[in-house]
Amino acid sequence: MARMKTFFIYFLLVVAFFLFSQVMIYIGIHTTYQSKKVEIKTTLPMQVEVKATSVNGFVKGKITNSEETAIENQYIKIECYSKHNVLMGTKYIKIDKIDSKEEKEFEVPFRFNKVDRAVIQLVAEKEQTEEEQRDEEKQETLSAQEKGLATMLGALIVLWFL
């Protein structure tokens, strides 16, 4: 019975450490993001928030269709600029359809360095070069590889302590 009690205490310690780690990671990541300037170049009402660190960030917002006709097959174009007005990169969000007086929320992550401001506009088609397409595919692949590496490392740590 004493052995089961010992295993139970070890189990509780592992769970407590896991929960503590998750809370600290959440706090560490979310306190490093800073709000950035946003310039909206569209007639449609839009609420947008841009937060970024020195190496990545995200754009989160809501677009409202105030027109009488539906918006179909358009893109929200997000251009990220540095403080020296250098274009760091562009992201697109496809809008399939927004009916009249309807709202749509969106969120898109980006991995551009030292973003200071974002310019957001509604465009009819995607203006993307082949190089940008390759970079975007590469970023998605790296993201999956990084997640796999983190999972493997976490499994090895857990196995080490068992």
Image: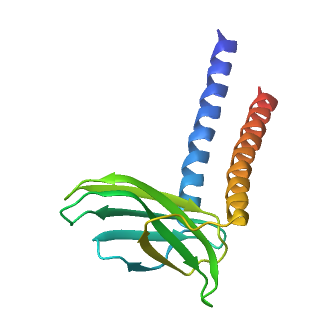
Locate residue 160, reporting x and y percent.
81, 31
Residue found farthest to the top: 1
- Which quadrant of the figure has residue 81? bottom right
Number of numbered discs present?
0
Image position of 9 with respect to 85: above or below: above
- Which quadrant of the figure has residue 88? bottom right
The residue located at (72%, 48%) in the rendering is 141
Q: Is residue 43 left or right of residue 95?
A: left
Residue found farthest to the bottom: 84
The residue located at (24%, 54%) in the rendering is 99
**Near-viewer residue (87 or 125):** 125
Q: Is residue 138 left or right of residue 114?
A: right
**Near-viewer residue (66 or 5):** 66
**Near-viewer residue (29 or 55):** 55
- Which quadrant of the figure has residue 60? bottom left
Image position of 143 with respect to 3: above or below: below
Locate residue 109, reporting x and y percent.
55, 60
Locate residue 140, reporting x and y percent.
67, 51
Locate residue 19, reporting x and y percent.
56, 41
Visual colour scheme: rainbow
Q: Is residue 91 left or right of residue 142?
A: left
The residue located at (58%, 70%) in the rendering is 90
The residue located at (50%, 70%) in the rendering is 78
Which quarter of the rendering shows the C terminus?
top right
Which quarter of the rendering shows the N terminus?
top right
